[in-house]
Amino acid sequence: VNFFTNSIGPARTEAAISPLALPFNLVKKHLQIVEGEISAQVRAFDPGIEEYVKYAVESRGKRLRPALVLLVGGATGNIGQEHVNLAVILELIHLATLIHDDIIDGAELRRERPTANALWGNATSVLLGDALFAHAMKLSASFEDAEICRQIANATSDVCAGEIIQTQRRRDWKLTLEEYYRIIEMKTGALFVLASDLAARLNHQEPAVQENCREYGRKLGIAYQIYDDCLDIAGSEEAAGKTLRTDLGKGKLTLPILRMLNESTDLRHKEICELLEDGGEPAVNQLADMAIAGGYVHRSIEETRALVAAAKAHAVALPDTEYSQGMQAIGDVLLSLLAKIDQ
Ligand code: IPE
Ligand code: IPE
Ligand code: MG
Ligand code: MG
């Protein structure tokens, strides 16, 4: 269930009254422009693949990264056309990574609809993701400041590297917490950093402000992935709108599972590893129950809350405007998402 009001289409009453929509409403006008421009990208593709691209870009995500670009843009100066372009580019890159990620995870549901791989198979979906990546790079080339394009390419490369390392390290019981943090910083943090860093850069901010924005994005991004990793264990597919428990099924070691492994006796450790090796539905459900009952999900959620607080502090350090308050409110959105899965 998507409670944000930034999507065009029939208004959702629940969304209209939700305080969670606050930061999104603040940049609503620009988000609508972003939405229109994302849809308009379909025309840039060959008519032979239009149908696939259309399906992909019409899916309604939370538009978290575009919202970040716009809020940080407002908090550091003006929200200009280049912020809108950046928001479009980031969402397209994010979308491409999701298409590829769903292939890797064998996921069937995304944004409340069948995944590209479920509809058209892996071959077409890999190439569709590539086409979206390439198109995002083409759009990036039109920034006046060439450094922006370079940074977008760099961050995208980091996302891919993070996904590759994670894939390589599946069912590697030696994975350390440090390595886990590094992976999530790359695969998810990179785009959050990019959003806030470049949004400030477009407003020619001084280094101290720039650094606050970067750190805000970095901490928020890491927090967001830990939240998502807890969601994979403790969330409901209906509410999340996507296939869950793929981390457990595919042997991806996430924070709650790593903590459970680290704190288990040898016998228990072996039992957990066997369940992860198994990867079948009963094993996966048993692992999830163990991680929840043992308090490992709860403790990971607590850790995420601390990261959100640290991220918010970077927004507080910026001049006090409705936009820097909006940046803090994004942190509150994450806190309320966390509360929903904390049991
Ligand atoms: C999902 O991202 C993948 C992660 C990095 C955790 P979002 O939760 O932002 O997905 P959408 O865009 O709302 O679908
Ligand atoms: C996020 O990882 C994927 C990327 C950053 C590309 P997940 O695999 O946890 O994302 P979901 O849960 O499928 O959305
Ligand atoms: Mg996935
Ligand atoms: Mg996940």
Image (cartoon, grey):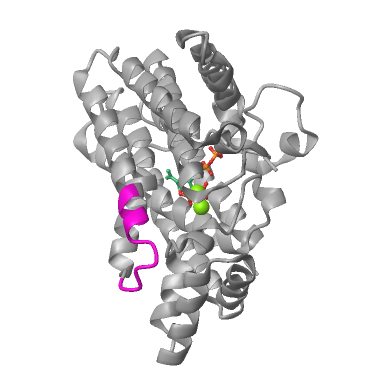
| Quadrant of the rendered image containing residue 292 | bottom right
Q: Is residue 42 above or below residue 69?
A: above
Residue 172 is a magenta residue: yes
| Quadrant housing the C terminus | bottom right
Q: Is residue 100 visible?
A: yes
Residue 242 on the magenta segment: no
Q: Quadrant of the N terminus?
A: top right
Report the side of 42 relative to 312 (left or right). right
User: What is the magenta range?
Assistant: 164-174
Residue 88 x %, y % = 45, 22
Counting from the top left corner in percent of width and height, residue 288 is at 59, 70
Residue pictured at 68% horizontal, 56% vertical: 236
Q: Quadrant of residue 282?
A: bottom right
Q: Is residue 127 above or below residue 276?
A: above
Front in this rendered view, residue 253 or 182: 253
Q: Residue at x 49, y 37 (%)?
A: 122
In the image, taking residue 243 as reference, residue 228 lies left or right, namely left
In the foreground, 166 or 311: 166
Q: Is residue 71 visible?
A: no
Q: Give coordinates of residue 320: x percent, y percent.
A: 43, 38
Residue 45 placement (x, y as % from top left) = 46, 11
Residue 291 sits above or below residue 165 on the image: below
* Above or below, 227 relative to 148: below
Q: Residue at x 58, y 66 (%)?
A: 280
The residue depicted at 37 percent of the width and 38 percent of the height is: 191
View extreme (right): residue: 13
